[in-house]
């Protein structure tokens, strides 16, 4: 256990920067859901990487944004909590995104921890733009390293991990080597269903939806899961169910396939849709749905 290093790494950045993709790529495990739409992640999620000489405890976080309803406030509280216990800040920026805006956001984080800037999505960025980003961030003295990666194509991740380990304190492991995350199975099941909503539903609807697992029973041959999809208006319920139930059955099938892969068992999945008016601004509902 000599020279063992261990510590907490918070992953921060704008919505859609690729934070969840990056954490999944580093852990080689799909822990966090990912979608082309912004504001996919709503909770902090731990992802623990344990190797012979180090343990890195990553926290994926919701993208930084200005709150426009209570759910947003809750999401930003999750970010604040992660920030508190963090040894290293990983700030993720989409290489094609606006530089001043990202610098301003990183500054508002006001973290006292060592910071690594990760320039993500280099697979679809011009070298000149990447250079421009680097130049601008080099001027911030708390940015210890700037690393270009593609989370999607898993480019340069070893380099990133090496730089992270350098910055971690000498510490014994915080978690058992078999521990991968902090969230229970029910959480991941509800997230997988929510991911399908992000892919199958248009525009605003995913943002009005929450998913809660009501039953999770391990039977002899399969796992029986009953989950509720919560929406904020009656009209949204109709859209999620679809003509003759076509939409809900598609979502159910896609989610079931992924849940089966995740828990490595056959799954019977029942989805119900409930309307809870304006749940995103209701503290009791937010708490019930895990926010
Ligand atoms: N081309 C390319 N796309 C990427 C890369 N990394 C992530 N993406 C895509 O960017 C989109 C957003 O990725 P997420 O991982 O959900 O982003 P996030 O930062 O977690 O977003 P929020 O949870 O909304 O804050 C998805 O469509 C990803 O496939 C990359 O390196 N290259
Ligand atoms: Mg995310």
Image (tube, rainbow, N blue to C red):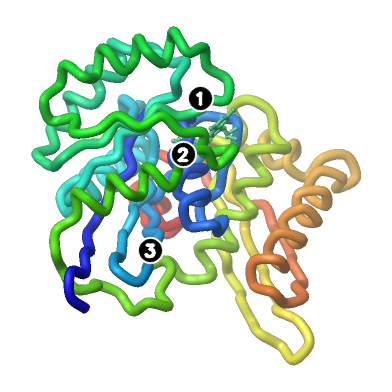
- The image shows residue 128 at horizontal and vertical percentages of 44, 8
- Say whether residue 166 is left or right of residue 102: left
Which residue is denoted by mark 1 in the rendering? 122
Among the two numbered marks 3 and 2 on one chain, the one whose residue lies closer to the N terminus: 3
The residue tagged with tag 2: helix, strand or loop? loop
Residue at 74% x, 36% y is: 239
Q: Which mark is residue 174?
A: none
Left or right of 279? Residue 12 is left
Residue 185: give x, y in percent of width and height: 53, 70
Residue in the foreground of this view, choosing between 223 and 130: 130
Q: Is residue 143 above or below residue 80?
A: above
Say if mark 3 contacts mark 2, CB within 8 Å.
Answer: no
Residue denoted by label 2: 156
- Look at the image and tell me whether residue 279 can be seen: no
Is 128 on the left-hand or right-hand side of 189?
left
Query: Is there a contact, CB below 8 Å, between mark 2 and mark 1?
Result: yes
Q: Position of residue 158 (x, y in %)?
A: 42, 47
Q: Residue placed at 21% from the left, 69% from the top?
A: 4
Contact (Cβ within 8 Å) of mark 1 with mark 3: no
Q: Which element carries disc 1, helix, strand or loop?
A: helix
Residue visible at 70% across and 34% down? 201
Is label 3 within 8 A of ligand 2 (CB to nearest ligand atom)?
Answer: no
Residue picked out by circle 3: 48
Q: Is mark 1 within 8 Å of ligand 1?
A: yes
Crowd band around label 2 with a 10 angstrom C-alpha radius: few (<14), some (14–19), many (20+): few
Quadrant of residue 135 within the rendered picture? top left
Q: Nearer the viewer, residue 187 or 151?
A: 151
């Amino acid at each position: 256990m000599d020279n063992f290093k261990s510590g907490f790494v918070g992953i921060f950045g704008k919505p859609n920067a690729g934070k969840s993709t990056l954490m999944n790529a580093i852990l080689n495990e799909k822990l966090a859901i990912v979608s082309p739409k912004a504001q996919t992640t709503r909770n902090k999620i731990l992802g623990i990487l344990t190797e012979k000489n180090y343990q890195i405890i990553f926290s994926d976080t919701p993208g930084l944004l200005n709150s426009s309803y209570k759910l947003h406030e809750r999401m930003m509280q999750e970010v604040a909590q992660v920030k508190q216990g963090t040894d290293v800040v990983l700030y993720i920026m989409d290489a094609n995104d606006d530089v001043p805006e990202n610098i301003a956001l990183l500054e508002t984080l006001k973290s006292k921890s060592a910071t690594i800037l990760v320039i993500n999505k280099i697979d679809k960025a011009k070298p000149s733009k990447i250079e421009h980003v680097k130049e601008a961030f080099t001027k911030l003295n708390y940015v210890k390293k700037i690393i270009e990666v593609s989370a999607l194509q898993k480019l340069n991740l070893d380099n990133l991990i090496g730089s992270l380990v350098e910055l971690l304190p000498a510490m014994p492991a915080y978690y058992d080597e078999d521990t991968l995350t902090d969230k229970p199975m029910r959480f991941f099941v509800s997230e997988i269903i929510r991911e399908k909503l992000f892919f199958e539903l248009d525009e605003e609807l995913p943002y009005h939806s929450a998913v809660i697992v009501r039953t999770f029973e391990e039977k002899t041959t399969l796992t029986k899961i009953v989950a509720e999809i919560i929406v904020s208006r009656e009209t949204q319920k109709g859209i999620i169910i679809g003509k003759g139930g076509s939409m809900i059955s598609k979502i159910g099938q896609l989610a079931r396939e992924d849940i089966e892969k995740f828990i490595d068992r056959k799954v019977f999945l029942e989805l119900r849709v409930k309307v809870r008016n304006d749940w995103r601004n209701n503290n009791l509902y937010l708490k019930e749905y895990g926010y």
